[in-house]
Amino acid sequence: MRVAFVSFETVHHRDSETNRRLHSVLELLYERGHDVHVFCARFWDGDVPAFERDGVTYHGVSSGLEAKSSFLARLPGMIWAFDPDVVHAGANPPEQVVSASLGGTLAGAPTVLEWHGDGGIENTWWNRRAGRWADRIVAPSEMVATWIRELGIANSAIDVVPDPVDLDRIREIDPNDSVDVVYARRLDEAANLESLFLGLAELRGRDWRVTVIGDGPERPVYERLASDLRIDDRIIFAGDLSLEDRIATYRGAHVFAQTAEHCVFPTEMLWALASGCVGLVEYHTASSAHELVEGWDRGFRTTSEEELADAILAAGDLERRDYDETFAEYDRDVVRDRYLTSYRALQDTSGFL
């Protein structure tokens, strides 16, 4: 299948959650032999119109990120000339969705809109227009789907497709030494690691060890807080780790704590749960993490430090695991098939043949 991905900015311009999400989808398709092309602002040196990296062809629709108007004007014709089976566009900027849809119409191909929602979704004229020009919208969580519906988009036009994890990769990595609780995230202003530390401080009289994975501007603040609470001797700040090392840590851990205030999809938590961790989530209105543990017998949802401390104690009564088949539906193969099924359904029902 020939798929035209449209993303004015890519992971090669800037490493953001939104850009990583779209890149992960194109990787899923490329891995199974599909013909993947990305239409974007040029990020490579020289004036060559196309550039190949890791088997994916990038088309420089504009000379760079400063030429947004040129990108929007040239995009429909370039998609038409490529003649894709499906157009798959990101939502940032929303104007590109309209241009991508025009190109798809010229080429006789449906347009799928990948709306990650990092940073929220404002109810603007362009966002509403983008949502109505797509033939199908994909959101990473029910929370983001709700934001999209608030634009006036019908629920029937939205699919919720999670970020994938690689279950084979998890099974291939040996567990690290045992740890009671693990936390993993960039340590910025939204990390909210203080909630976990305050909950753990309630349990000073018990034996526990914590590993914090990740780095960021707030790390010194959290290190001082751990010292002030007199729990710093039980906490290891491991810094940034490779995915392999993180998986090894999760497979050896008992509980994964998710307390961040903002999260459109808890990808790191999903890796941990599939690696056998019990899930502990502090509820926040701008986080979808609670969706992973609702109705699950190895998950806890809390709203305060006291509830969090109680949940850590309750989690201690659950068996330790280093793998959980419960999350098979999130495997890369399953998520890839969901995208391909959606593409084919659009072609069949919308007359794009």
Image (tube, helix red, strand yellow):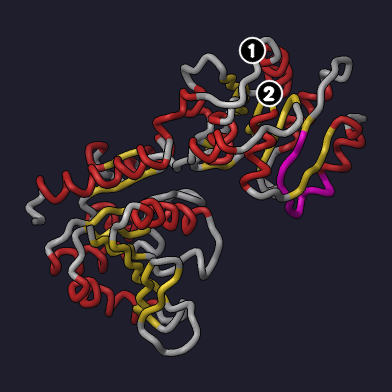
Is 213 covered by the magenta stretch? Answer: yes
Left or right: residue 112 versus residue 231 is: left
The answer to the question of whether label 2 and label 1 lie on touching residues, with beta carbons closer than 8 A, is yes
Q: Secondary structure at mark 1?
A: loop
Q: Position of residue 26 (x, y in %)?
A: 38, 57
Q: Position of residue 226 (x, y in %)?
A: 86, 36
Please give left or right for residue 251 compared with residue 200 in the image: left
In the rendered image, residue 9 lying in the magenta stretch gets the answer no
**Bounds of the magenta segment:** 211-221
Q: Where does the N terminus fall, quadrant-wise? A: bottom left
Label 1: few (<14), some (14–19) or many (≥20) C-alpha neighbours in 10 Å: few
Image quadrant occupied by the C terminus:
bottom left
Q: Is residue 156 left or right of residue 65?
A: left
Please say if 84 is above or below 295.
below
Q: Which residue is pictured at 40% across the width and 66% down the height?
A: 55
Residue position marked by numbered label 1 in the rendering: 318
Q: Residue under label 2, please give it.
A: 254
- Comparing 302 with 279, the one in front is 279
What is the total number of numbered labels drawn onto the structure image? Answer: 2
- Distance (Cα) linking label 2 and label 1: 9 Å
What amino acid type is highlighted by mark number 2?
A: His
The residue under the point 47% across, 59% down is: 19
Frontmost residue, 183 versus 190: 183
Question: How far across and how far down the image is residue 317, in percent?
Answer: 68, 10
Relative height, residue 323 to residue 169 (above, below) = above
Residue 123 makes an appearance in the image? no
Q: Is residue 259 above or below residue 88?
A: above
Q: Is tag 2's residue or tag 1's residue first in the polypeptide sequence?
A: 2
